[in-house]
Image (cartoon, coloured by chain):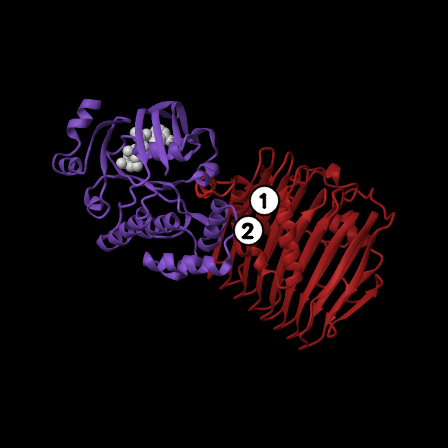
Amino acid sequence: MSTLEIRDLQVAVEDKEILRGVNLTVRAGETHAIMGPNGSGKSTLAYAIAGHPKYTITGGQVLLDGVDLLELGVDERARAGLFLAMQYPVEVPGVSVSNFLRSAVTAVRGEAPKLREFAKDLKAGMDALSIDPAFAQRNLNEGFSGGEKKRHEILQLELLKPKIAVLDETDSGLDVDALRVVSEGINRFRATGETGVLLITHYTRILRYVKPDFVHVFAGGRIVEEGGPELADKLEAEGYEAYTKASA
Amino acid sequence: MGLETKPLSTLHEKASYDPADFDVPNGREEEWRFTPLSRLKGLHDGAAVVSGGGVAVSVEAAPEVTVETVGRDDQRIGKAYVPADRISAQAYAAFEKATVVTVPREAVASAPTVLTFAGGGGVAYGHTVVKLEAMAEAVVVLDHRGSAVYADNVEFVVGDGATLKVVSLQDWADDAVHVSHHHAQLGKDATFRSFVVTLGGDLVRLSPSVSYTAPGGDADLTGLYFVDAGQHLEHRLLVDHSQPNCRSNVVYKGALQGEGAHAVWIGDVIIRVEAEGTDTYELNRNLLLTDGARADSVPNLEILTGEVAGAGHASASGRLDDEHIFYLQARGIPFEEARRLVIRGFFGQLIEKIEVEELRERVMAKVEAELAG
Ligand SMILES: Nc1ncnc2c1ncn2[C@@H]1O[C@H](COP(=O)(O)OP(=O)(O)OP(=O)(O)O)[C@@H](O)[C@H]1O
Ligand SMILES: [Mg+2]
């Protein structure tokens, strides 16, 4: 059973302090929602955990089952069982979806999947997310609509089977049908009870499909309030004003 | 930079078989300013006299194709192309034997015809003519390897309705110097496909040019180069549209790595007054993989008619995108492999355009080897 432990994490971007001591523990079987206003540092938290070179860690620790992820390279963190579904997935010209996925699965599993098995898994994964099989031959994220990019993030989630998934606004830009399809993907991933989810969102909409166990309010680079699912409804009704004033 | 403002059409009008008609370059001329003259081993100033093992030409011809080794006085030589610079004229003045490849009228070559140029050390000059008569079709491979200081001219004469596909591979040893002109002359409705791959050599300067003698000509010039530390690989393209309704498309892509790796790409396209309905596009992209590498990329388009079907160019040199690498690594893919995927992606479908499977695999393997460092 896995645990992601974020301890007093402090992060700067270009000498500007963004995260000011984040503490959060995500255990296998749990789903945590992080909600907070624009610019409060939610994506910074996600990228910093994943190891994006733009973010400088100025203090704290991030432990996955006791291993300090901050000591590892980006690819090593992923192989250790961390997954980040990005708010804005990157377009990579010239690299096909299928080639990319096969490389990623090979890297994460430590051995190349049997071709036939991989093709079967890929097809099943795409079907489940209502992704046209033709996408396998397209360049990674290139020219994908916002919603198509998000579906592909969840496709990767399901194929790579990480221990802990950080989903950064996977719900934004999705229409109602896509939201349902994507939520079902996340729920399949959660169903084993052996994985933890950290779901970053602005809206309670997705939380009706993907029920969180805990809700954290993020403002000014730290968690300012915590509670159960009911907190999300309160935020929906009242907005973040109370928190942004307090943190400013 | 007074020279740069000179119209292309005047820049390229000089032509002569006699090296004495060209001044010895001093490096300040527009056409020489990127080339390190001191590394030409005397090809530009007459100091390089034929010596040593030279360059041995061996031939593997398709049954439909005739290949002859001929003397300087052969009437088929120098018909399509007049040397356009000092080294080209030097090569023309100094070659002893020429290779003439002929594909007869309406013949369709059933296999590629491969000319291998094997450098055995020393200085050599060469001349090659590839002539496709009307409606003929052939694939011709020029495979350069070994070590030499070598200057040559290649004339491709593509007859009416004929289709010539050429692959020229510059896979020289590290100390080789090669200066070459490839000129293609396209007849009515002729099709020319050129694929240039330049990987090896201390200095390679290849100038592919295209001219049209009648309407309907169609030229695709594709190039790929991989420049390592200390190498100077230069490609200078000239497409001279002087006939109506012809097409040209130039795509050259290169990757550079290491201290002193230097790529030069010049893409000159002239669309003359009479060349109405011309459709042309040229693109050069360079991927700088390390510090200390440099790419000079200069597309020039001179349009003298108001009636073009399409004319454009693009040039970009840049580094590997950190965001691309991050995304791949965030999915567990190790840095080196992520880099390989992105570079392969950069060269994209270029390699797949190589007609000859064996060659395609060889080029692929070479590029992979370059990537492995
Ligand atoms: N490269 C950068 N240079 C300077 N500031 C940056 C940079 N990247 C991010 N920031 C700042 O860091 C802060 C946090 O940004 P972040 O993207 O983490 O917010 P967020 O909570 O994810 O917002 P959103 O809800 O809009 O996605 C913002 O004020 C942002 O402007
Ligand atoms: Mg964000």
Ligand 1 has an atom within 8 Å of the beta carbon of the residue at disc 2: no
Image coordinates of residue B267 in percent, x first then y, are 58, 50
Image coordinates of residue B110 in percent, x first then y, are 68, 73
Kindly give the residue lying farthest to the front in the view shown.
Answer: A1
Q: Which residue is at a point 55% across and 45% down the rendered structure image?
A: B340
Mark 2 surroundings: few (<14), some (14-19) or many (≥20) residues within 10 A: many
Q: Is residue B230 visible?
A: yes
Q: Secondary structure at mark 1?
A: strand
Q: Is residue B241 visible?
A: no
Q: Where residue B347 is drawn, which disc sits there?
A: 2
Pointer 1: what residue? B255
Q: Which residue is at a point 66% across and 37% down the rendered structure image?
A: B229
Answer yes or no: do the residues labelled 1 and 2 have beta carbons within 8 Å? yes
The front one of A126 and B118 is A126
Looking at the colours in the rendered structure, which chain would you say is drawn in red?
Answer: B
Whole-number angstrom distance, CA of label 1 to CA of label 2: 9 Å
Name the kind of residue labelled 1 in the image. Answer: Ala
